[in-house]
Image: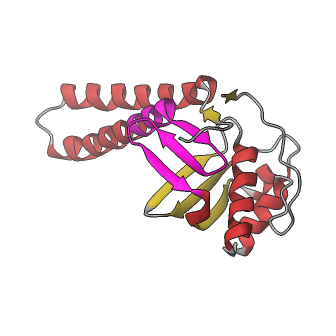
């Protein structure tokens, strides 16, 4: 990364604890059933599939735990189990999706979660709203999309507005919370 200001974000451990617990319980139940009924094909198929599903969920949680996302004026960088770099000037796609029920979204405390997908220069990066600095990352992606002439779909533009970010105007960046600046 070239010189200049670098903001580094990560998923807080407190947001991952529940996922680690769910994965552990799922793996423990699946493996214990498989160990106690090794001869039954139906049990192996059902609980083998469930064990594989929870194993994949545990792997996904570990990937988020190890992920570090660095923003510079030139690019967004991610490191963890894999390293990716997406220069802001080559950003081709920005999607911001909300997952949850309407009732969750209308509550003052919120509910559900958002997922930001960025693509360009042969790289793709997907981040969930539980990462530190999510609003700032979304603001920076919207700014890059505007500068590159990348159009946003109506759902993404609406979700940015929910975060207080107008994709069509160059507003001030949101406050960065819980980050490391170098």
Residue 82 in percent (x, y) is at: 39, 42
Q: For the point 59% across and 32% down, which residue is it?
A: 11
Whether residue 83 appears in magenta in the rendering, the answer is yes
Q: For the point 53% across and 62% down, which residue is it?
A: 119
Which residue extends farthest left? 39
Q: For the point 74% across and 68% down, which residue is it?
A: 146
Depth check, front residue: 182 or 125 = 182
**In this rendering, position of residue 21 left or right of residue 167:** left
- Looking at the image, is 162 positioned above or below residue 70? below
Whether residue 5 appears in magenta in the rendering, the answer is no
Asked if one can make out residue 22 in the rendered structure from this viewpoint, the answer is no
Q: Which residues are magenta?
A: 58-87
Which corner quadrant of the image does residue 136 belong to? top right
- Please state, as top left, top right, bottom left or bottom right, where the C terminus lies in the image: top right
Asked if one can make out residue 122 in the rendered structure from this viewpoint, the answer is yes
Residue 15 in percent (x, y) is at: 62, 30
Residue 54 in percent (x, y) is at: 38, 38
Which corner quadrant of the image does residue 41 belong to? top left
Q: For the point 68% across and 57% down, which residue is it?
A: 141
Depth check, front residue: 28 or 153 = 153
- Looking at the image, is 13 positioned above or below residue 113? above
């Amino acid at each position: 990364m070239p010189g200049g200001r670098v903001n580094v974000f990560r998923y807080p451990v407190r947001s991952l604890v529940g996922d680690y617990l769910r994965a552990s319980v799922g793996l423990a139940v699946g493996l214990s059933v498989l160990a106690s009924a090794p001869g039954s094909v139906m049990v192996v198929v059902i609980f083998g599939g469930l064990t594989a599903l929870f194993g994949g969920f545990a792997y996904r949680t570990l990937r988020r735990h190890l992920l570090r996302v660095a923003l510079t004026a030139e690019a967004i960088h991610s490191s963890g189990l894999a390293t990716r770099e997406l220069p802001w000037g080559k950003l081709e796609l920005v999607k911001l999706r909300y997952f949850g029920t309407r009732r969750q979204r209308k509550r003052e405390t919120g509910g559900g979660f958002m997922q930001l997908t960025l693509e360009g220069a042969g790289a793709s990066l997907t981040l969930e709203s539980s990462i530190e600095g999510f609003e700032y990352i979304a603001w920076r992606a919207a700014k890059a999309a505007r500068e590159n002439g990348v159009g946003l779909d109506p759902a993404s533009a609406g979700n940015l507005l929910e975060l207080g970010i107008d994709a069509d105007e160059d507003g001030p960046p949101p406050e960065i919370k819980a980050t490391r600046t170098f």
